[in-house]
């Protein structure tokens, strides 16, 4: 029997963590032939280290879409993906998450009459001003399989009229990757490199346009971080988008950011600014932090499993299970409110650690069983 071709499409680093466990199982499965396509959506510095660390296979195709305006980026990906899918003729196209690459690949496959499987389907912030929310809704609308991470995602899809047979709860694929590599990440020397001690620092990530494209909003958030640095060290691996915005408005200069290799860390008014970190270094920093402040959905999930207090610097979250079952709290973007939340955590007011159901490291196995039933059993 010939092997069933399946294409996985990735483009940004959250995709890599979700696709990696599926790719690993499909590539060694006797019934499937897996092809990986990289759209090239993310900056190389945010992308290349993850392929090496997560043992992802080299992409067979790299579309080189690059960054830029969302509509133009999506159009480039769709145009360049069509000939690839025509050549490979997959029985299923797998997409993950909510970035522009996710939507572009799902729309392309759907228009070509190819089935789509959406990893991490059903998440909703109910805030259509977020580009990711629109991407999530549209991707789910054209997906034949909505692989969900949690019960709230199932409910969201049912409320939108998605037929029950298209909804399959498999758990959180990102947590499969975390559990697989957690011991290896523990060997990272990043704390020594940055001169940090366990639980002596706050870890920060900021990248969402609503937080970093506004001069006023970014300035206010950085002012909060600098005030917080009077209590404990603040480590800030800077996303390229955030770095450019801060440079433009004078929050830092080019000499302030440091590498994370052998470079000695420098501090900018109490902040330890670093380049984007690899998966192992960042996971080590998360696991040993006193508190994490972020606007990233994936970080909300990872801190939940790591048991590290997390403050989400947004007014909403598409991952409410990290609040009901995890260590996450919505802190918003008001400086006083954020600092109040931090003070509570430093005083010991920390949510109890509970892991959401099916976040057990075996989500990819459940997803593969679904594909076996669909494509291999006669």
Image (cartoon, grey):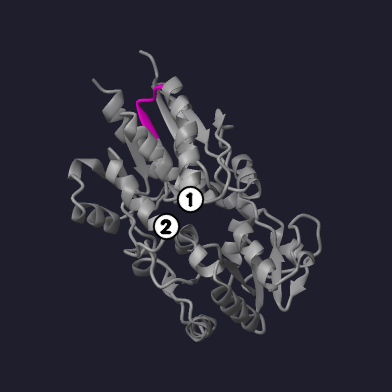
- Determine which residue is flagged by label 2: 131
Q: Which residues are magenta?
A: 89-93
Name above or below for residue 193 compared with residue 201.
Answer: above
State the SS at label 1: helix
Q: Indicate left or right for 273 with 308 as reference.
A: right
Seen at 47% across and 84% down, the residue is: 337
> Where does the image place residue 193, in percent across and percent down from the top left?
76, 61
Q: Indicate left or right for 269 with 110 as reference.
A: right
Seen at 42% across and 22% down, the residue is: 86
> Where does the image place residue 180, in percent across and percent down from the top left?
52, 46
- Determine which residue is flagged by label 1: 70
| First-in-chain label (1 vs 2) | 1
Seen at 51% across and 63% down, the residue is: 209
> Mark 1 touching mark 2, by CB under 8 A?
yes
Q: Nearer the viewer, residue 285 or 74?
A: 74
Please check the rendered image and state whether residue 70 is part of the magenta-colored stretch, yes or no: no
Query: What is the crowding at mark 2: few (fewer than 14 residues within 10 Å), some, or many (at least 20)?
Result: some
> Where does the image place residue 158, in percent across and percent down from the top left?
20, 52
Q: Nearer the viewer, residue 372 or 223?
A: 223
Seen at 38% across and 51% down, the residue is: 135
């Amino acid at each position: 029997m010939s092997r069933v071709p399946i294409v996985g499409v990735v483009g940004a680093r959250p995709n890599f963590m979700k696709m990696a466990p599926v790719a690993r199982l499909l590539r060694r499965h006797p019934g499937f032939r897996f092809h990986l396509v990289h759209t090239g959506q993310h900056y190389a510095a945010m992308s290349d280290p993850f392929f090496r660390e997560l043992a992802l296979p080299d992409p067979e195709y790299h579309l080189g879409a690059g960054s830029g305006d969302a509509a133009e980026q999506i159009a480039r990906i769709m145009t360049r993906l069509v000939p690839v899918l025509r050549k490979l003729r997959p029985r299923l196209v797998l997409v993950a998450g909510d970035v522009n690459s996710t939507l572009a690949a799902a729309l392309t496959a759907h228009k070509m009459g190819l089935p789509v499987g959406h990893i991490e389907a059903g998440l909703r912030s109910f805030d259509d001003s977020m580009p990711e929310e629109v991407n999530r809704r549209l991707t789910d609308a054209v997906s034949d399989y909505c692989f969900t991470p949690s019960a709230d995602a199932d409910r969201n899809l049912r409320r939108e009229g998605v037929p029950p047979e298209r909804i399959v709860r498999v758990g959180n694929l990102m947590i499969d990757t975390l559990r697989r590599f957690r011991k290896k990440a523990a060997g990272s020397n990043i704390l020594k490199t940055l001169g940090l001690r366990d639980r002596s620092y706050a870890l920060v990530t900021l990248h969402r346009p609503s937080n970093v494209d506004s001069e006023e909003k970014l300035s206010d958030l950085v002012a909060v971080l600098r005030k917080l640095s009077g209590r404990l060290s603040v480590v800030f691996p800077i996303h390229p988008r955030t770095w450019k915005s801060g440079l433009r408005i004078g929050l830092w200069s080019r000499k302030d950011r440091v590498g994370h290799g052998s470079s000695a860390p420098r501090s900018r008014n109490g902040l330890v600014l670093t380049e984007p970190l690899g998966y192992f270094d960042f996971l080590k920093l998360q696991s040993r932090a006193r508190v994490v402040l972020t606007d990233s959905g994936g970080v909300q999930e990872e801190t939940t499993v790591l048991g590290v207090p997390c403050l989400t610097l947004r007014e909403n979250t598409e991952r409410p299970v990290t609040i009901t079952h995890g260590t996450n709290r919505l802190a918003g973007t008001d400086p006083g409110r954020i600092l109040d939340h931090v003070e509570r955590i430093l005083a010991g007011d920390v949510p109890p650690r509970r892991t959401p159901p099916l976040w057990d490291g075996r989500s990819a196995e459940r997803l593969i069983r679904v594909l076996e039933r669909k494509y291999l059993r006669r």
